[in-house]
């Protein structure tokens, strides 16, 4: 340690080394920004300059753009999608607090969304005869959601990782069971059972009721109210994240043992993370239920939870603006992908981008592209030689173009589709495990099988198809940018 001690003739400031961390100084922490991995070239320059823009400026720009949407779009459906997108943003912010900042794998998060929804429905609906003012029921439902999150966190505060995920998933299943069978709790109907509660009153403030519709079109008052609540949640969580509690949450995420050694109340941090995230979810549940005038157990299925996790992962877990962008993109994509034509274009675009990201611009990329094209043409020609009905199942647009390459029969035999799906899974497994020339050999037929399964089984079922495209988009993103769109990439110390 003598090399770090200054000579008696020098002042401590003059003797501090500049090439490494000094004892008693937080140089390693101070130079944390130097260890971040940034993009090279013009992309890195643009990204660095965008990061210098104040957070409040980005927020104001984002809110201003969102507020102008009803001005230029008169469709009630589009406005409703905008409202649901804002609700998703709030839910993503709450989930990011638990998963991205606290590092807690919470698989029961969507249940807190349901708690807020049912509390509002019970105390402000014609079913039970209660009509609590909205100015009281909204914060009350938020507090109840936070308390439920605290209660869930109490028995699981010593758990982490997979064990915590199992406990929270059990809580989600318990919530769904109670909500579905809540019409027979000790002889009383509390949740309406599987039929839910469909007589919920709209929001009202100072004696003024916010209309859900105006002349049969979705009223924008709920949309602007959702934006106001989103801004309140975003700003509040921003300051919390930059407080001692926020820094402690991130320390808990990185290394719980180290955080505990440093004297941080780890168990209490877990409880506050659970409770705060649950409160945000419950708040989102109140305005969603008030708009829909109903609440059903199916509104809180695991599919919604998976969608929320996709939003957080896509935007960048731990990044507050990232999860907002992720929620916006996923919500809009799920609506766009309901159209088979748009879903088809995006599906093939994702595959092309994924292959290019894997092989870059190289000879192997040319080999894969040429081999896939030749393989498809040959397969199509062989199928057409047997009978024309084997290749007459698609016409018009991109489907018509692909009909000369992908085998699309007028009527697909069920077992053929099942076998193709099984072979696709085997091909994907081989393509990920094999290397070199073996991968080049297996990849073209695997890509063709993907196109065959998509055209014959996924396009006729747009519901599952859009989630498959979303999954492919996430896979490609994880290859190109593993930490999400706006997530920070850092050098890990092993």
Image: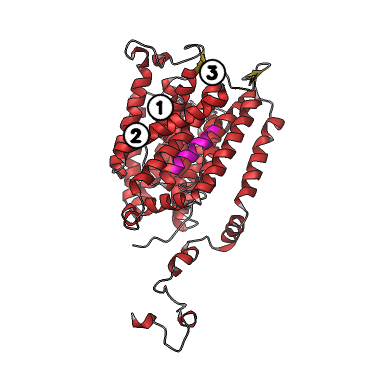
> What residue is shown with label 2?
152
Characterize the local packing of mark 3: few (<14), some (14-19) or many (20 or more) Cα atoms within 10 angstroms.
some
Give me the C-alpha separation between circle 3 and circle 2.
28 Å
On whether residue 92 falls in the magenta region, the answer is yes
Q: Which residues are magenta?
A: 87-97
Left or right: 305 as drawn, with respect to 345? left
On whether residue 246 falls in the magenta region, the answer is no
Residue 426 in the image, given as x and y percentages of width and height: 31, 40
**Relative to 326, does residue 264 appear above or below in the rendering?**
below
Give me the C-alpha separation between circle 1 and circle 2.
19 Å
> What residue is shown with label 3?
293
> What residue is shown with label 1?
301
Chain-order first, disc 1 or disc 2: 2
| Element type where label 3 sits in the image | loop
| Element type where label 2 sits in the image | helix
Seen at 46% across and 50% down, the residue is: 246
**Residue 419: quarter of image:** top left
Residue 81 in the image, given as x and y percentages of width and height: 58, 29
Chain-order first, disc 3 or disc 1: 3
**Relative to 389, does residue 57 appear above or below in the rendering?**
below
Residues tagged 1 and 2 counted as in contact (Cβ below 8 A)? no
Please name whichever residue, 33 or 406, is drawn nearer the observer in this view of the structure: 33
């Amino acid at each position: 340690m003598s090399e770090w001690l200054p000579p008696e003739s020098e002042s401590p400031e003059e003797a501090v080394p500049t090439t490494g961390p000094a004892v008693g100084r937080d140089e390693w922490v101070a130079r944390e920004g130097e260890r971040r991995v940034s993009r090279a070239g013009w992309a890195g320059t643009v990204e660095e300059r965008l990061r210098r823009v104040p957070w409040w400026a980005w927020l104001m720009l984002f809110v201003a753009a969102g507020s102008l949407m009803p001005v230029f779009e008169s469709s009630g459906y589009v406005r409703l999608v905008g409202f649901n997108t804002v609700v998703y943003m709030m839910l993503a912010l709450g989930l990011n607090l638990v998963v991205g900042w606290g590092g807690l794998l919470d698989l029961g998060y969507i249940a807190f969304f349901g708690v807020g929804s049912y509390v509002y429905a019970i105390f402000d609906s014609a079913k039970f005869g209660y009509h609590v003012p909205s100015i009281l029921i909204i914060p009350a439902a938020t507090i109840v959601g936070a308390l439920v999150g605290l209660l869930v966190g109490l028995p699981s505060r010593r758990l982490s990782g997979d064990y915590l995920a199992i406990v929270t998933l059990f809580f989600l299943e318990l919530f769904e069971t109670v909500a579905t069978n809540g019409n027979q709790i000790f002889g009383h109907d509390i949740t309406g059972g599987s039929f839910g509660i469909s007589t919920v009153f709209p929001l009202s403030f100072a004696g003024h009721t916010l209309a859900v519709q105006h002349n049969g079109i979705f009223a924008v008052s709920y949309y602007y109210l959702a934006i106001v609540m989103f801004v309140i949640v975003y700003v509040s969580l921003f300051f919390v994240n930059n407080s001692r509690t926020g820094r402690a949450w991130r320390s808990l995420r990185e290394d719980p043992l180290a955080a505990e050694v440093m004297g941080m109340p780890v168990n209490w941090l877990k409880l506050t993370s659970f409770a705060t995230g649950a409160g945000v979810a419950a708040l989102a549940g109140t305005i969603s239920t008030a708009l829909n005038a109903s609440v059903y157990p199916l509104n809180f299925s695991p599919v919604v939870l998976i969608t929320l996790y996709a939003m957080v992962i896509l935007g960048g877990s731990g990044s507050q603006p990232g999860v907002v962008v992720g929620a916006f993109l996923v919500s809009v994509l799920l609506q766009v992908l309901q159209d088979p034509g748009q879903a088809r274009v995006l599906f093939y675009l994702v595959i092309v981008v994924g292959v290019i990201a894997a092989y870059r611009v190289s000879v192997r990329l040319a080999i894969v592209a040429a081999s896939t094209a030749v393989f498809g043409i040959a397969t199509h020609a062989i199928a057409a030689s047997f009978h024309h009905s084997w290749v007459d199942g698609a016409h018009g647009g991109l489907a018509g173009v692909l009909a000369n390459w992908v085998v699309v029969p007028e009527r697909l035999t069920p077992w053929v589709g099942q076998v193709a799906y099984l072979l696709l899974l085997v091909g994907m497994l081989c393509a990920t495990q094999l290397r070199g020339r073996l991968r080049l050999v297996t990849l073209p037929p695997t890509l063709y099988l993907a196109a065959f399964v998509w055209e014959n089984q996924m396009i006729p079922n747009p519901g599952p198809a859009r989630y498959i495209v979303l999954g492919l988009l996430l896979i490609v993103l994880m290859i190109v940018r593993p930490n999400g769109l706006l997530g920070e990439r850092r050098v890990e110390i092993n």
